[in-house]
Amino acid sequence: ISLATLHTRGLPTDFHLPAQPHTELPTYPFQHKHYWLEPPAPVGDLNASGLDTADHPLLGALVELPDEQGVLMTAQLSLKSHPWLADHAVSGTVLVPGAALVEMAVQAGDQVGAGNVDELVIETPLVVPPEGAVRLQVTAGAVDTLGRRPVTVHSRAQDAEGWTRHATGFLTETGTGTGTGTGTGTGHGTDDPAPADLTTWPPKNAEELPVADFYDLRYVAGYEYGSVFQGLRKVWRRGQELFAELALAPETAADAAAFALHPALLDSALHTAAFADQQRSAAERTLLPFAWNGVQVHATGATALRVRLAPAGADAISLQAADATGTPVVSVGNLTFRAVDPAALAQGGDGTRDSLFRLEWQEVRAPENTTGDDWPVLDLTDRTDADIRELTGHVLTAVQTHLATEPDDTRLVVLTQDARHDPAQAAVHG
């Protein structure tokens, strides 16, 4: 209505519009909020299709595998169905965080009584497309001879023909852990570290580090974390140890009870590693979680954490976290990071394929009885100082015979003696 119309109608014209509240512009485009309701994706009758409801934010349905004595869990992810994933991007490419893949493995393991992640190697980062969705399959298989269950995570885009395997590993029952690994980690094994006492807080004799501009600096480095994944509140250093205080954003904390451990909280705990000296020297590299070993969730539904990180090798850490009372929530025996190519991520490729991998030996806990039918033994401990060609030829023939005549799941144990100093034993060991 114009001022002339107000005057004609005898209405007052000496009014003032209310002042607009002062607002600050976001420092980058991933700080945003939606003020409209997003309609939930329609869900059909899963029971009528022979499926059970998974009742988990990341996993929609599950089905038991009778022959494999395992479970298959399925889901469909997109930025429309899971908008909070947009807050986890690397150089403009939205990635499902490694912590979310761990959460999926834990959920699959819980269905079969094996909720500990003995090992989970992320072979290919899982990219969430700007449009459309990706289908997921998480499988926990039958128990192997070491008492573990294999676990895998696959995805397929809507317009893709085949499936891509993103993660593979092993699950164990709660309270157990084989400490095995497959040679992809750092060689420190997965034995549980001694529990840290996080009841005294802040940690004694620790230097507090500034964190005010931490996420702005991470954005410049290519890690584009939105508000959901900006959980770091305080950080302390004590020698080589790092301590951190974390909390979920209020709008995210309401969903924490639906997870074993909300991926945004565990991912934020990993941000603490950026304060380590080795990470400072690697500032020009883009590092992502690669190999998880010895992951145990001790309590579910946490919304805040006290965290302790310690170095566990080159680009590797161990992690222990507790709630605000110091009660353990999650522990990670060993987590190795790997450098990725941001350009490969943008193309949907395997960002770790061109990484500099290395081969290392990890101890394998053998059964007490290694002479049974399931564990044939080739004992070379009495063949020290043997001829190199003769001994390696003997072992090669034995291995070829084993592969040709024994079932695929039968392991051959080769026992060597003093392989670090004896040339023939070293050749066999290699």
Image (cartoon, rainbow, N blue to C red):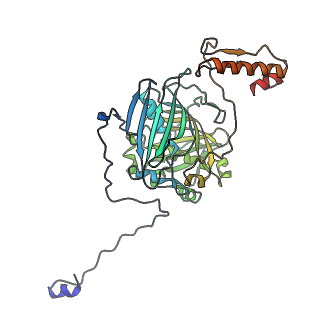
Position above or below: 57 against 144: below
Most extreme residue toward the left, as rendered?
9
Position above or below: 375 against 178: above
Position above or below: 180 against 240: above
* Residue 411, image x, y percentages: 62, 20
* Residue 291, image x, y percentages: 59, 38
Report the side of 100 relative to 360 (left or right). left
* Residue 186, image x, y percentages: 66, 36
Position above or below: 330 against 67: below
The residue nearer to you, when weighing 252 against 145, is 145
* Residue 187, image x, y percentages: 66, 33
Image quarter where the C terminus lies is top right
Report the side of 128 relative to 389 (left or right). left
Image quarter where the N terminus lies is bottom left
Residue 314 makes an appearance in the image: yes
Residue 58 makes an appearance in the image: no
Numbered-mark total: 0
Name which residue lies at 36% across and 46% down.
254
The residue nearer to you, when weighing 105 against 328, is 105
The residue nearer to you, when weighing 142 against 163, is 163
The image quadrant that residue 183 belongs to is top right
Name which residue lies at 39% across and 42% down.
57
Report the side of 9 relative to 277 (left or right). left
The residue nearer to you, when weighing 254 against 105, is 105
